Image (cartoon, grey):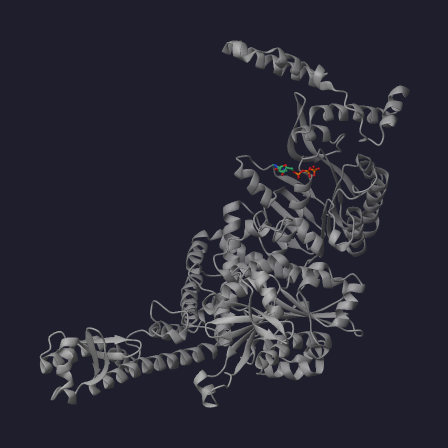
Amino acid sequence: MAQYFEIKAANPGYLLFYRMGDFYELFFEDAEIASAALGIVLTKRGKHLGQDIGMCGVPIHAANDYLNKLIRQGHRVAICEQVEDPKEAKKRGAKSVVKRDVVRLITSGTLTEDDHLDARASNFLAALAMVRHGDTDFALAWADVSTGETFTADLTAEQLQDELARIDPAELLLTEPTRTHLLEHRLLPPAWAAIAHLAPAESFDSEAATSSLRAALPGGAFDPTALSRAARAALGAVFGYVRESQKGVGVALRAPVADGAIRHMAIDQATRASLELHQTQRGQTRGSLRQVIDLTVTASGSRLLSARLAAPLADAPAINQRLDAVGHLANDTLLTSRLRADLKAVPDLARALTRLALDRGGPRDLAAIGKAVGAAAALARHLEQREEVPDVLARIARILSAAPLPLASELALALDDELPLLARDGGFVRKGYDRALDDERALASETRAVVAALQARLIEETDVRSLKIRHNGVLGYFVEVPAGHGTKLLEEPHRQTFIHRMTMANAMRFTTTELADLEGRIARAHEAALEIELKTFASLRYDVLSRTDALRELADALAELDVTSALAHLAATRGYTRPDIDDSLAFRIEGGRHPVVEDMVMAQGQSFVANDADLSGDDAVGGGRLWLVTGPNMGGKSTFLRQNALIAILAQMGSFVPATSAHIGVVDRLFSRVGASDDIAHGRSTFMVEMVETSAILNRATRRSLVVLDEIGRGTATFDGLSIAWAAVEALHDTTGCRALFATHFHELTSLAKTLTRVSNVTMKVREWEGEVVFLHEVGPGAADRSYGIQVARLAGLPEPVLARARQVLTVLEQRSAGTASSSQKASVLDDLPLFAHQPASRPVEKDPVHIALDAARPDEMTPKQAIDLLYELKKIRDDARRS
Ligand SMILES: Nc1ncnc2c1ncn2[C@@H]1O[C@H](COP(=O)(O)OP(=O)(O)OP(=O)(O)O)[C@@H](O)[C@H]1O
């Protein structure tokens, strides 16, 4: 066990997968954790210091599934392999232990295998460095180890949370002091705390990082000193952690992109959640914006689309460049469908390349690269047939046409059609590619004919017709004759040729020098063939890796082409239009639709009602407009609010939008708060959350921002809520001057439009029909006079007695606020307050005319006509009761 303890001590915080034969075994506490996490049996093996040693194990062939489960549950695993042949160990003495060492650390942020990764999602490892001096407070570096993409950004404390929400890392490295600081300043929400991994302060040393980064990214193209000290420290921590986890295999990361240089629309976590960008509030992908707009056909395209959705741009020229490309393809549907058809066959180049770089790749990864390069050339031809393509497409076409075609041809020549996962399994080099390999293979595969010929000759020589040459794992090749003939072979002249190996009940087994020779040659042929194949693999891998930069650029271009053509396809098939994007304060949407609700409504066979919004502002008049949206419950307020926020996001990520026209002056920050929810885990009540979020908006929104607030202030007593909502509207109007949509059930707020010049009232229209409300989902000018809450409650199935009582209370409250309630009415309601205090039900059931009619009915004695008449009568009684 000494070896185990030594290795375990060198890898604290990791579950040790300790290789023993065909199993990875776990011991002591690791075994307890893993057996509980994986649902496998915990056994015992011997004793240590008088205590039983707990143990559990997973078979090698199924290890990946188990690893997956553990990583998903947030565990970290160290893979400890035998690093010498057991025969070597024996040479040191019968009792010596086979050398073992940890060959890889597996954590959620450092995964590279397809089995562990979601093909359509990035998987980031992030490191956060804190500085107590300088311009910024923090720097973040993050990398997707599976593709090599790497980024850095300098951040203020205020930006930190938005950035983390955007990147959504799988693992976050930081030091203990940084964590303490974040916790003290409430900057580390539970979701980030759960993925945080404490790293020693040395790993964040900016000086050491400078030299280690230079060594990891040679070639001089990247100068670490161009980064801030904090960014260097964070990047150094990422590279160090990846290096440590890959245990000397090398770090296949790219030079970092300075993300701070790109202007993005700031979107905080609450806004992302409320707009359901990547997943719904219930954590599902179905029903999210991403799910509706993601029509990409490659995994890397899908990852890029997701990244663009997470980080819309805030730079009009850059957005327009993307829109030019999408527009070009949306108009040329023939070209788009050709591109999309060819893109479908493009494998995940970036991930295959990384696996090869980390020496974890196999023949299929080589083939994937060849296929992607080949496809790139075909795609380039499609693009080159068109004249005057926009800049983005011209750049993509240039990169695609520079794809290293000789490499693809070489790979196609070398690799067979059916490929094994691992190179060491052999059999992947195509026949005809290497003469020497073909010769060795011929020898190996011609075994049967050679053996058959030898068998025929031996039969001839011995005259034993039943003589056979057989093979088994213990003896290898041997000659077998029935027992009766055995003695013949033991005698002259045959005893010169046949060497006795074994006597069985009815047979005798021999070998011959020639047979042993043949056996040796066959085994050597297999070995020699595999050796040649492995050499071929190594040389092809070298060819691929020597073009790493070009291939990475190609992978990026393919992903970008997929995203662009997918957005064009979306625009063409869903009736999206190109938004006008500039640096004004415009926000004018005509015929806007909610992309997700539209899909849902249409799936139910109904049509979605498009609505206009105009929040356009002007600096000269003090900023953007603020629309106060009132209307009944279920009238479509939230849908209207969200659709405008989503249109802004889609437009700035470079997509067409669901509207007949849209003119948007770049939005720098987007805020959306819809309703209120508890954050019990963070110890904050519904109302507290609402106020913290509202204050974030009031403090952070600028004139360029778009603010969408739905029912702020409803989580407290009516007057408090109303006053807060009132003050918030005033502040947004007077101080911030942003473009805003504010939905509310406080109808009193609508009077603000009289005093605040840039506030307008709009309402969701409804029609009443036979006592029922019909929602038109149409936005029109004006203010709603009521909320129709009771009608909606009835639609939801609230019991009739409760509804009747609610109507009664509502009438009195309304009269009271209008000053027309009689004193006895006022007294009666005041007696009942608080409103929902229980009052013994007035047992209306016994007097209910519907019940009386039903009690009187005798179904067994009725004719069909009488039954129908009764049904009509019951409906009439119900309708009369409703009208009264
Ligand atoms: N423009 C529209 N066209 C068609 N159906 C719509 C439209 N807007 C909303 N709906 C439908 O009405 C439902 C309710 O909409 P929404 O949640 O936006 O109402 P609301 O006014 O915010 O309600 P509440 O005040 O109760 O929160 C939606 O789920 C959708 O089915």
Q: Is residue 222 above or below residue 321?
A: below
- Residue 136, can we see it? no
Q: Position of residue 151 (x, y in %)?
A: 63, 70
- Residue 688, can we see it? yes
Query: Residue placed at 65% from the left, 15% from the top?
Result: 850
Q: Quadrant of residue 786?
A: top right
Q: Position of residue 300 (x, y in %)?
A: 51, 62
The residue at the far right in this view is: 823
Q: Is residue 600 above or below residue 489?
A: above
Q: Position of residue 622 (x, y in %)?
A: 80, 50
* Nearer to me, 440 or 330: 440
Query: Residue placed at 66% from the left, 37% from the top?
Result: 636
Q: Is residue 756 left or right of residue 226?
A: right
* Nearer to me, 866 or 451: 451
Quadrant containing ligand 1 reads top right
Q: Is residue 808 left or right of residue 527?
A: right
Q: Quadrant of residue 842?
A: top right
* Nearer to me, 92 or 693: 92
Q: Is residue 753 above or below residue 657?
A: above
Q: Position of residue 757 (x, y in %)?
A: 81, 42
Q: Is residue 405 left or right of residue 212?
A: left
Position of the N terminus, as image quadrant, is: bottom right
Position of the C terminus, as image quadrant, is: top right
Q: Is residue 654 above or below residue 511?
A: above
The total number of labels drawn is 0
